[in-house]
Amino acid sequence: MGEMQAPPGPIVCVVGARPNYMKMAPLLHAFRATPALPGVLLVHTGQHYDVAMNERLFADLELPAPDLNLGVGSGSHAVQTAEVMRRFDAVVDDIVPCCVVVVGDVNSTLACSLVASKRGVPVVHVEAGLRSYDRTMPEEINRVLTDQIADVLYTTERDALRNLEQEGIALERVAFVGNLMIDALLAHKARAHAPHTTLRNAGVEASFLEHAEGFGVVTLHRPSNVDDPDALGEAVALLCDVARRIPLVWPVHPRARANIARFGLATALERAPIALLQPQGYLEMLGLLADARLVLTDSGGIQEETTALAVPCLTMRENTERPITVAHGTNTLVGRDRARIEACVDDVLKTGGKRGHVPELWDGRAASRIAAHLAAWLATRVPRTGHSLA
Ligand code: UD1
């Protein structure tokens, strides 16, 4: 008789930063509802740690508290990535996962993929193949490298497959499953908080939402917009101009808030019809986005959410890794170009702005497709034994 095979370890699911949570929540629920899959362990690297960036979103998304929090915190890219690797290495050692599931493109995504792959643990990357083709974006480096070492790659749009093919990735490793972000949106939309409640809770006067044109929503946090004084100064001046035509609600990311103060831009903003809020929960944000006339953002996820909600999105970047939102959705790339922004705002106020349709498979069922595919994939694998480089 051969040796008894050890039962497969759990699936280790990794989150690190805010945009990971809305993808992992539907996935965890689907994994737990799939009897063919092994157990699931949720690991939080601690890349994001503020209550506003974490606990509120976990509660809104009905994400269980992480089984482990590695408490890594902020730091330079090198320090943060290295620290996640060091701490996640010990987790892989202890747990011996059957696979590690990572989502998106944050530093934690790459760090945990590297650790798992070097220990022979299969890496599953959700939201694979997105490319901005802009290597000055830290996320682009994370995307390219994670996809290279991933064993299973789940994509949200067909362009992603072409990007992966160009980078020599074997297509049998890739499955087009749809968009987890939209699973979360559809699951929670009915419970979204009304904007007037969100603004009242933030101490903003009720009259703010009584403007004849409605309101717009702003989010900015990319280093290319908020880390350089000239860039952030330009962005703030543009937003103040837009706000003269339609009032703006801006939940301010900690990175942007720190730099607004540091570069002396707070006074200009406070004088404009712009409500500056703390980072909001998922249900508050969903309510704001759903009711907005337009959204100005540099976020990746919000480009997708506005396309699903049919709200015009002006993306303050020169490129996007999510071209389907421009080709099929409501997204327009405007950078920090005054003329482009003015033309888009004109169009929104006169005609309602760009219309689009919801992309293929953004139907709320991405998580169950992934769970079914992963169960079949794990079942075909010969369990590895003793594969460790330690
Ligand atoms: C990270 C991701 C980015 C994602 C964004 C969403 C990378 C490379 N970047 O960027 O892709 O779109 O999260 O928010 O992974 N800070 C706090 N509290 C927190 C977390 C951060 O105050 O809970 C402050 C710290 O001063 C920190 C700064 O924000 O230095 C930046 O945080 P960091 O995690 O390095 O990057 P983000 O800009 O949040």
Image (spheres, helix red, strand yellow):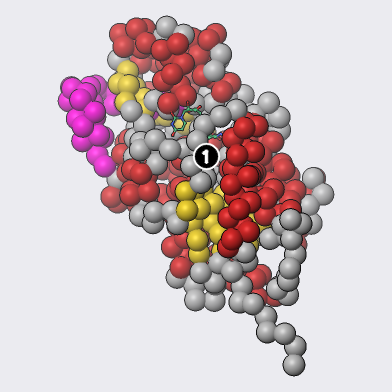
> Where residue 179 sits in the image (x, y, percent)?
53, 52
Q: Does the magenta stretch include residue 73?
A: no
Q: How many labels does the image show?
A: 1
Residue type at mark 1: give it.
Val
> Where residue 284 sits in the image (x, y, percent)?
31, 39
> Where residue 77 sits in the image (x, y, percent)?
62, 31
Disc 1, SS: loop
For the N terminus, give its image quadrant: bottom right
**Can residue 212 be seen in this snapshot?**
yes
Magenta residues, start to end: 193-220
281 vs 360: above or below = above
In the picture, measured across the screen, residue 93 lies left or right of residue 29, that is right
Q: Tell me which corner region of the image, top left, top right, bottom left or bottom right, holds residue 250.
A: top left
For the C terminus, give its image quadrant: bottom right
Which residue appears at 26% of the width and 42% of the height? Answer: 193
Q: Does the residue labelled 1 lie within 8 Å of ligand 1?
A: no
Q: Which of 62 and 332 is in front in this view?
A: 62
Which residue appears at 78% of the width and 52% of the height? Answer: 169
Can you identify the residue that label 1 sits on? Answer: 72
**Can residue 350 be seen in this snapshot?**
no
> Where residue 85 sits in the image (x, y, percent)?
63, 44
- Crowd band around label 1 with a 10 angstrom C-alpha radius: few (<14), some (14–19), many (20+): many
Q: Tell me which corner region of the image, top left, top right, bottom left or bottom right, holds residue 252.
A: top left
Which residue appears at 75% of the width and 88% of the height? Answer: 2
Q: Nearer the viewer, residue 105 or 49?
A: 49
Q: Nearer the viewer, residue 133 or 356?
A: 133
In the picture, measured across the screen, residue 275 lies left or right of residue 231, that is left
